[in-house]
Image (cartoon, rainbow, N blue to C red):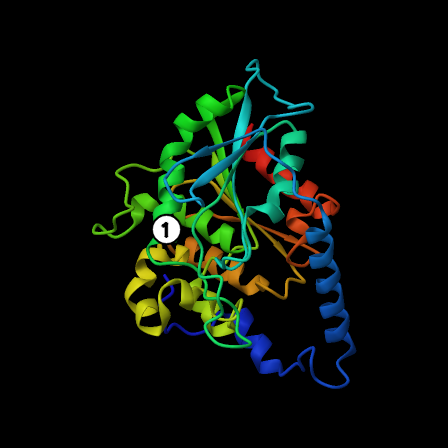
Amino acid sequence: MPEADAPLPRALESERAEGTPTAAEPGNTGGRDAAARAAAEEESVFSHAPVAPDSTAAYGDHPDQVVDFYHPRGAAGSPGPSPLAPLVVVLHGGAWRAPYDRRHITPFADFLARRGFAVACVEYRRGSATPAAPGENPVAGRWPDTFDDVAAALDALPALAREALPQADTRRTVLTGHSSGGHLALWAAARHVLPADAPWRTDHPAQLRGVVALAPIADFAVAEKLDVCGGAARQLLGGEEGFVERQAYADPALLLPTGIATTLVQGREDLDVPQVVAESYTEAAAKAGEVVGLTLLEDVGHFPLIDPAADACAVVAEEIAQLAW
């Protein structure tokens, strides 16, 4: 399993060794094109109006401790006799930072509901809304609050879903998340392999059909070396000292094997969470004796995976269906 000071994966070493100019360097037309495409993809996903849920339930007392529920609509496509729809639990991204809440992923939740899934979209506490210093991003995440909330939400969901989504079959639950939400999805599925003293550890694996992690921050060591999202993983764990002490409790690449079917979906042109982060996680899984699927999408960046207007979003829905049905 990767350690915090482990060497870079081979793919990352080759990228560094080639000395390719960055998008900001003069003469790098390809880099400018990639940056322009990434900006257009981000603009598209944030252009959709938020979609109101059918109902909302609280799993705690804090205003962020809520779950939005979307009833299944359209053809479910189940090959079996059950009229109930699989439950998809969605964890939004945004680098665990306060300005990015679940609203931007509600069109994706609605997209899944229109594909016949019952959907639960989880909110959780994130970092401060105030930048650490002028010109910097807000601090990412809260320790341990962010993890407390995800664990509490997943524990409460079966009962909440039975009340709010009688159309849902909680025995066929798939957990998905995008970017930092992809990290949280992988982490939530690995609670039974957390260190013994972890407060979120469970005695048994989560009752999941599987996990579909979308461009996840899946390997903290690699993410740190690449400065993914401005060092968000380091901030999530409380800075340099916290990162060293807490990585074993939070890094999905160190929490393997899980024994739960897992697929990662990744755009090859992702500039926010590069492909090598997902590849490093799948390599770690293989070393731990577990096969993790990795679906790589050509000419796709970070945001089309959750953009209902993008073809990549339909691919994601199919990956979820493969596990749910």
Within 10 angstroms of label 1, few (less than 14), some, or many (20 or more) residues? many
Quadrant of the rendering where the C terminus is positioned? top right
Farthest residue to the bottom: give it.
26
Residue 223 location, x and y as percent? 48, 67
Figure label count: 1
Residue 235 location, x and y as percent? 41, 67
Element type at mark 1:
helix
**Is residue 207 at all visible to an observer of this figure?**
no
- Position of residue 202 relative to residue 56, above or below, is below
Q: Is residue 240 left or right of residue 72?
A: left
Residue pictured at 75% horizontal, 45% vertical: 309
Residue pictured at 47% horizontal, 74% vertical: 225
Q: Is residue 112 left or right of residue 216?
A: right
Residue pictured at 42% horizontal, 42% vertical: 65
- Position of residue 171 relative to residue 141, above or below, is above
**Which of the pair 195/230 is nearer the observer?**
230
Q: Which residue is mark 1?
A: 147
Residue 107 location, x and y as percent? 66, 41
Farthest residue to the left: give it.
197
Quadrant of the rendering where the N terminus is positioned? bottom left
- Position of residue 289 relative to residue 162, above or below, is below
Farthest residue to the top: give it.
81
**Is residue 54 at all visible to an observer of this figure?**
yes
Residue 48 location, x and y as percent? 71, 47
Residue pictured at 52% horizontal, 68% vertical: 228
Instruction: Name the amino acid type tagged 1.
Output: Phe
**Which of the pair 158/31 is nearer the observer?**
158
The image quarter containing residue 7 is bottom left
Q: Is residue 303 left or right of residue 10?
A: right
Q: Is residue 31 left or right of residue 283?
A: right
